[in-house]
Protein backbone atom coordinates (compact mmCIF):
# COMPACT_ATOMS: atom_id res chain seq x y z
CA UNK A 1 0.00 0.00 0.00
CA UNK A 2 1.45 3.35 -1.04
CA UNK A 3 1.65 6.13 1.59
CA UNK A 4 -0.05 9.45 0.92
CA UNK A 5 3.27 11.29 0.25
CA UNK A 6 4.42 8.52 -2.11
CA UNK A 7 1.08 8.61 -3.93
CA UNK A 8 1.36 12.39 -4.25
CA UNK A 9 4.80 12.00 -5.85
CA UNK A 10 3.51 9.35 -8.25
CA UNK A 11 0.64 11.67 -9.18
CA UNK A 12 2.88 14.50 -10.38
CA UNK A 13 3.45 13.14 -13.90
CA UNK A 14 -0.18 12.18 -14.69
CA UNK A 15 -1.60 15.36 -13.15
CA UNK A 16 0.77 17.69 -14.99
CA UNK A 17 0.29 15.83 -18.29
CA UNK A 18 -3.49 15.83 -17.92
CA UNK A 19 -3.65 19.57 -17.36
CA UNK A 20 -0.91 20.62 -19.79
CA UNK A 21 -2.12 18.51 -22.72
CA UNK A 22 -5.69 19.63 -22.11
CA UNK A 23 -4.68 23.26 -22.56
CA UNK A 24 -2.27 22.63 -25.43
CA UNK A 25 -5.01 20.77 -27.30
CA UNK A 26 -7.24 23.85 -27.14
CA UNK A 27 -4.51 26.00 -28.66
CA UNK A 28 -3.60 23.45 -31.32
CA UNK A 29 -7.17 23.03 -32.55
CA UNK A 30 -7.76 26.79 -32.41
CA UNK A 31 -4.80 27.20 -34.76
CA UNK A 32 -6.25 24.59 -37.12
CA UNK A 33 -9.45 26.62 -37.32
CA UNK A 34 -7.78 29.98 -37.86
CA UNK A 35 -6.82 31.51 -34.50
CA UNK A 36 -3.04 31.77 -33.97
CA UNK A 37 -3.23 33.59 -30.63
CA UNK A 38 -2.03 30.69 -28.47
CA UNK A 39 0.55 29.64 -31.08
CA UNK A 40 2.07 33.12 -31.24
CA UNK A 41 2.30 33.25 -27.44
CA UNK A 42 4.12 29.90 -27.34
CA UNK A 43 1.26 28.12 -25.57
CA UNK A 44 0.83 25.30 -28.10
CA UNK A 45 3.59 23.32 -26.43
CA UNK A 46 4.14 20.36 -24.15
CA UNK A 47 6.50 22.41 -22.00
CA UNK A 48 4.73 22.37 -18.61
CA UNK A 49 6.39 25.62 -17.55
CA UNK A 50 4.27 27.42 -20.16
CA UNK A 51 1.03 26.10 -18.66
CA UNK A 52 1.54 25.38 -14.97
CA UNK A 53 -0.43 27.39 -12.46
CA UNK A 54 1.25 26.90 -9.06
CA UNK A 55 -2.03 26.66 -7.18
CA UNK A 56 -4.21 24.88 -9.74
CA UNK A 57 -1.66 22.47 -11.20
CA UNK A 58 0.34 21.51 -8.11
CA UNK A 59 -1.05 22.70 -4.76
CA UNK A 60 -4.76 21.88 -5.19
CA UNK A 61 -4.27 18.38 -6.69
CA UNK A 62 -1.59 17.63 -4.08
CA UNK A 63 -3.85 18.64 -1.19
CA UNK A 64 -6.74 16.63 -2.61
CA UNK A 65 -4.51 13.57 -2.83
CA UNK A 66 -3.10 13.91 0.68
CA UNK A 67 -6.53 14.53 2.24
CA UNK A 68 -8.12 11.59 0.43
CA UNK A 69 -10.69 13.64 -1.47
CA UNK A 70 -13.08 11.56 -3.63
CA UNK A 71 -12.08 13.42 -6.79
CA UNK A 72 -8.77 14.76 -7.99
CA UNK A 73 -8.75 17.82 -10.23
CA UNK A 74 -6.83 20.98 -10.98
CA UNK A 75 -6.31 23.61 -13.63
CA UNK A 76 -3.63 25.37 -15.65
CA UNK A 77 -3.27 28.87 -17.00
CA UNK A 78 -6.02 29.03 -19.64
CA UNK A 79 -4.82 29.03 -23.24
CA UNK A 80 -5.95 32.30 -24.86
CA UNK A 81 -8.32 31.83 -27.79
CA UNK A 82 -9.77 34.70 -29.82
CA UNK A 83 -12.97 33.15 -31.10
CA UNK A 84 -13.45 36.07 -33.50
CA UNK A 85 -10.41 34.83 -35.44
CA UNK A 86 -11.96 31.43 -36.09
CA UNK A 87 -13.20 30.93 -39.64
CA UNK A 88 -16.69 30.02 -38.42
CA UNK A 89 -16.70 31.25 -34.80
CA UNK A 90 -19.90 29.65 -33.50
CA UNK A 91 -19.26 26.28 -35.14
CA UNK A 92 -15.49 26.15 -34.66
CA UNK A 93 -15.83 27.09 -30.98
CA UNK A 94 -17.34 23.64 -30.45
CA UNK A 95 -14.24 21.86 -31.77
CA UNK A 96 -11.82 24.11 -29.88
CA UNK A 97 -13.70 23.57 -26.62
CA UNK A 98 -14.04 19.81 -27.17
CA UNK A 99 -10.30 19.41 -27.84
CA UNK A 100 -9.37 19.59 -24.15
CA UNK A 101 -11.80 16.91 -22.88
CA UNK A 102 -10.97 14.85 -25.97
CA UNK A 103 -7.28 14.94 -25.06
CA UNK A 104 -8.15 13.85 -21.52
CA UNK A 105 -10.14 10.87 -22.78
CA UNK A 106 -7.25 9.82 -25.04
CA UNK A 107 -4.83 10.08 -22.11
CA UNK A 108 -7.18 8.11 -19.84
CA UNK A 109 -7.21 5.36 -22.44
CA UNK A 110 -3.40 5.30 -22.66
CA UNK A 111 -3.04 5.26 -18.86
CA UNK A 112 -5.52 2.39 -18.63
CA UNK A 113 -3.50 0.39 -21.15
CA UNK A 114 -0.39 1.12 -19.09
CA UNK A 115 -2.19 0.01 -15.91
CA UNK A 116 -3.04 -3.29 -17.60
CA UNK A 117 0.63 -3.76 -18.52
CA UNK A 118 1.78 -2.88 -14.99
CA UNK A 119 -0.40 -5.40 -13.15
CA UNK A 120 1.26 -8.46 -11.54
CA UNK A 121 2.16 -10.83 -14.34
CA UNK A 122 2.00 -8.04 -16.91
CA UNK A 123 4.93 -7.20 -19.19
CA UNK A 124 5.79 -4.09 -17.12
CA UNK A 125 4.68 -5.35 -13.70
CA UNK A 126 5.28 -2.60 -11.14
CA UNK A 127 3.22 -1.46 -8.16
CA UNK A 128 4.43 2.13 -8.50
CA UNK A 129 3.73 2.27 -12.22
CA UNK A 130 0.31 0.71 -11.65
CA UNK A 131 -0.59 3.34 -9.03
CA UNK A 132 0.63 6.12 -11.32
CA UNK A 133 -1.40 4.76 -14.22
CA UNK A 134 -4.56 4.46 -12.12
CA UNK A 135 -4.13 8.05 -11.00
CA UNK A 136 -3.70 8.97 -14.66
CA UNK A 137 -6.99 7.31 -15.55
CA UNK A 138 -8.79 8.99 -12.64
CA UNK A 139 -7.50 12.54 -13.12
CA UNK A 140 -8.16 12.51 -16.85
CA UNK A 141 -11.69 11.18 -16.52
CA UNK A 142 -12.51 13.69 -13.78
CA UNK A 143 -11.11 16.58 -15.83
CA UNK A 144 -12.99 15.42 -18.91
CA UNK A 145 -16.34 15.05 -17.14
CA UNK A 146 -15.95 18.24 -15.11
CA UNK A 147 -15.07 20.28 -18.18
CA UNK A 148 -17.97 18.85 -20.18
CA UNK A 149 -20.56 20.17 -17.73
CA UNK A 150 -22.60 22.80 -19.63
CA UNK A 151 -21.52 25.69 -17.40
CA UNK A 152 -19.58 28.55 -19.01
CA UNK A 153 -16.62 29.06 -18.94
CA UNK A 154 -16.12 25.28 -18.78
CA UNK A 155 -15.61 23.60 -22.14
CA UNK A 156 -19.08 22.06 -21.96
CA UNK A 157 -20.55 25.53 -21.59
CA UNK A 158 -18.76 26.73 -24.72
CA UNK A 159 -19.86 23.59 -26.59
CA UNK A 160 -23.45 24.26 -25.54
CA UNK A 161 -23.20 27.89 -26.64
CA UNK A 162 -21.99 26.70 -30.04
CA UNK A 163 -24.79 24.16 -30.39
CA UNK A 164 -27.75 26.14 -29.08
CA UNK A 165 -29.88 28.57 -31.15
CA UNK A 166 -28.70 32.17 -30.95
CA UNK A 167 -31.16 33.34 -28.29
CA UNK A 168 -30.57 30.39 -25.94
CA UNK A 169 -26.82 30.56 -26.58
CA UNK A 170 -26.80 34.26 -25.67
CA UNK A 171 -28.61 33.56 -22.38
CA UNK A 172 -26.19 30.77 -21.45
CA UNK A 173 -23.14 32.86 -22.40
CA UNK A 174 -24.21 35.52 -19.89
CA UNK A 175 -23.61 33.02 -17.09
CA UNK A 176 -19.85 32.97 -17.79
CA UNK A 177 -18.84 35.72 -15.30
CA UNK A 178 -20.60 33.74 -12.56
CA UNK A 179 -19.53 30.27 -13.71
CA UNK A 180 -16.84 29.83 -11.06
CA UNK A 181 -19.33 30.73 -8.30
CA UNK A 182 -21.78 28.17 -9.70
CA UNK A 183 -19.10 25.46 -9.74
CA UNK A 184 -17.91 26.22 -6.20
CA UNK A 185 -21.52 26.21 -4.97
CA UNK A 186 -22.13 22.82 -6.58
CA UNK A 187 -18.89 21.53 -5.03
CA UNK A 188 -19.68 22.77 -1.51
CA UNK A 189 -23.25 21.44 -1.58
CA UNK A 190 -22.17 18.04 -2.89
CA UNK A 191 -24.26 18.45 -6.04
CA UNK A 192 -21.13 18.44 -8.19
CA UNK A 193 -20.35 14.86 -7.11
CA UNK A 194 -23.95 13.86 -7.80
CA UNK A 195 -23.71 15.30 -11.31
CA UNK A 196 -20.34 13.77 -12.09
CA UNK A 197 -20.77 10.30 -10.59
CA UNK A 198 -23.00 8.76 -13.30
CA UNK A 199 -20.97 10.44 -16.04
CA UNK A 200 -17.75 9.05 -14.58
CA UNK A 201 -19.26 5.56 -14.40
CA UNK A 202 -20.30 5.81 -18.05
CA UNK A 203 -16.86 7.06 -19.14
CA UNK A 204 -15.12 4.32 -17.15
CA UNK A 205 -17.36 1.65 -18.67
CA UNK A 206 -16.54 2.99 -22.13
CA UNK A 207 -12.82 2.76 -21.40
CA UNK A 208 -13.14 -0.83 -20.20
CA UNK A 209 -15.15 -1.68 -23.30
CA UNK A 210 -12.42 -0.24 -25.52
CA UNK A 211 -9.59 -1.92 -23.63
CA UNK A 212 -11.54 -5.16 -23.42
CA UNK A 213 -11.07 -5.88 -19.74
Image: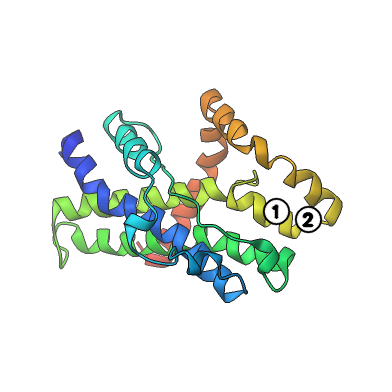
Quadrant location, the C terminus: bottom left
Residue sitting at the far top: 189
Task: Give the residue pinned by disc 1.
Answer: 160
Mark 1 surroundings: few (<14), some (14-19) or many (≥20) residues within 10 A? many
Q: Residue at x 66, y 62 (%)?
A: 83
Q: Residue at x 74, y 59 (%)?
A: 163
Is residue 5 at all visible to an observer of this figure?
yes
Q: Residue at x 30, y 37 (%)?
A: 62
Residue sitting at the far right: 167
Question: Dot 1 lies on which element?
Answer: helix
**165 with respect to 153 (left or right):** right
Is residue 17 at all visible to an observer of this figure?
no
- Residues at marks 1 and 2 touching, judged by CB atoms closer than 8 Å: yes
Check residue 43 in the rendering and tell me which mark sits there, or answer none: none
Find residue 22 and report its horizontal and vertical position in percent: 45, 58
The Cα–Cα distance between marks 1 and 2, rounded to whole angstroms, is: 6 Å
Asked which colour scheme the image uses, the reply is: rainbow
Find residue 101 and report its horizontal and vertical position in percent: 51, 57
Task: Give the residue pinned by disc 2.
Answer: 164
Quadrant location, the N terminus: top left
Question: Dot 2 lies on which element?
Answer: loop
Q: Residue at x 48, y 47 (%)?
A: 201
Find residue 79 and report its horizontal and vertical position in percent: 50, 57
Q: Looking at the image, is 4 positioned above or below residue 18?
A: above
Q: Splitting the image into 4 quarters, where does residue 93 fall?
A: bottom right
Mark 2 surroundings: few (<14), some (14-19) or many (≥20) residues within 10 A? few
Amino acid sequence: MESAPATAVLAIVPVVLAIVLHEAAHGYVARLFGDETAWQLGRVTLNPLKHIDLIGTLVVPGLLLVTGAPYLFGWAKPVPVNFANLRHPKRDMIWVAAAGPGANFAMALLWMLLAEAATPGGPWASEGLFVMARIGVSINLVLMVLNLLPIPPLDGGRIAVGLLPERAASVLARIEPFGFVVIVTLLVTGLLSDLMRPLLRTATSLLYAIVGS
